[in-house]
Amino acid sequence: MLDLVPNADGLVLTFIETGARAERQHSRTLATAQARLAAVVNAVADVVIRERRLTLYARTFSYTHEEYRNIAGAIALFQHPDIRLMMKETPHDFFLTHPNDEFTGTIARPTIVEFDTGAEFNGQGLIANTWPEHILTRARDLLRRPHVRGYVARTDRYGDTRIIGRPSEINLLALDRFTQDPQVTAETIYDDFITARYGCAALPEVKAAFKNAFDIVTSALYTLGTNTADHSSLNYDPYGSSYARHVSGKWLDPPIVFVHHDVNREFHYWKDVIDHLAPAWAKTARGAQLDEVPWVTKEGWLRPGEQMTLAFVEDVRREKQYGVRLAEASVKAIERAKPSLDPRAYEDLHHYFTRTWLTARLHAAVATAYFGFRLYARGEAFRTPASTQAVRDALADIPEIARLIKTYPVKPAAGQWNWVEDADAALKYHGQITQTGWPAVTRGVPNPHAGKTFPMISR
């Protein structure tokens, strides 16, 4: 393969999360998982470093604390002193609510930090992903750590997606400027990027729109402090990773989060957020990856069965509506900036933030309907006229928002996340709640709400 790319000066090897997990293979001579992982990297290094005299980065991340121990042990067995490391900004995957990765920069090998400016779980550049404050906060910690020599940044997520030439390129500028001046501020990044691209006169309104992005995404694609979007797509159920593998509380001790977004409450990630948000099937070993968080099961933090309550439905609804209001405010800010913008720049920004607004509206409607229906399905004792009407209103909104998305005149680039397909997903929820009923079994687990539907009455 290296012969096919003679101008390449190095190779990045992801040596975990592969189709055939080397650490799980049988070996009579390599007795530990660490030894088996190291054997793979050492074999590749023999070619890349010794034969070809190229650079090799061993790229790593982990699903669990145990895997981190395996990886650290494997790195200690690397035979080539010139093997370098690439480690993510966060443990496991790129979630805005995850802490900084604690291992990055702690191992005595030259390390580069992998940032996800392509926003894999956060909109993939198709909706508002403009948050230099967040980028700088991570950079000020990670890029100052021992053994860290620089960074690498994702700039797309498959297909035709990209952030180069798009508003979210501002996050790349933040990384670049930080390496030049560690004291640079987010305000300077906003001002320089927007002025250079859109002009000084447009700065106040475009800046206001950009600044809303982080809170829009963390209240639309996240719910009460943890990600509930399947690689940016709308999928509350049956996507199990949102309720185990991807929970930010997995990496926090204590697993506590304070949620703003008009909720203004502190939550325990497991006893509060996941115990209530997770459908019954996702709190079983077959339903989600609970083997990755054994202490959660040991502590009894997740109760079996449906635990949705009126208070949690209301918190979800408030948070989602907060995101809708911010997204609408961003659209209006761009409209106010129209006289100061080049027509093509205005159209691009207006579509960018309108897609963001429609996304926030769709999540608000589907989340209210889905979580509210689960409360309704628990029986009369859990229903109030207001909560029932909120579900009814959300269900009435879903078809119209879905229509606006499906008929939107300018479709965004398609990659891993196809924005338009979220409309179909929303309509599927609508049909299950109002017509067909929820499946009898999900991931091999009986559904307590199977066959139940919500009675629709026209408004």
Image (spheres, helix red, strand yellow):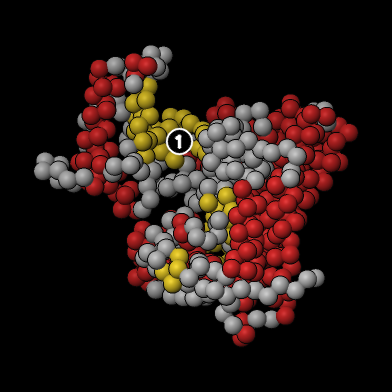
Residue at 65% over, 66% down: 369
Q: Residue furthest left?
A: 28
Q: Residue furthest front?
A: 436
Residue at 74% over, 45% down: 407
In what quadrant of the picture does the C terminus appear? bottom right
Between 34 and 148, the one nearer to me in the picture: 34
Residue 134 left/right relative to 17: right
Residue at 63% over, 53% down: 424
In what quadrant of the picture does the N terminus appear? top left
Quarter assignment of residue 259: bottom right
Query: How packed is label 1: few (under 14 Cα within 10 Å), some, or many (20 or more)?
Result: many
Between 321 and 237, the one nearer to me in the picture: 237
| Residue 111, position as x, y percentages in the image | 39, 33
Report if residue 41 is visible in the image.
yes
* Residue type, numbered disc 1: Val
Element on which disc 1 rests: strand
Residue 425 left/right relative to 338: left
- Image position of 90 with respect to 373: above or below: above
Q: Residue furthest right?
A: 339
Residue at 50% over, 60% down: 238
| Residue 36, position as x, y percentages in the image | 21, 41
Report if residue 144 is visible in the image.
no
Q: Residue furthest bottom?
A: 381
Name the residue beneath numbered marker 1: 113
Between 155 and 279, the one nearer to me in the picture: 279
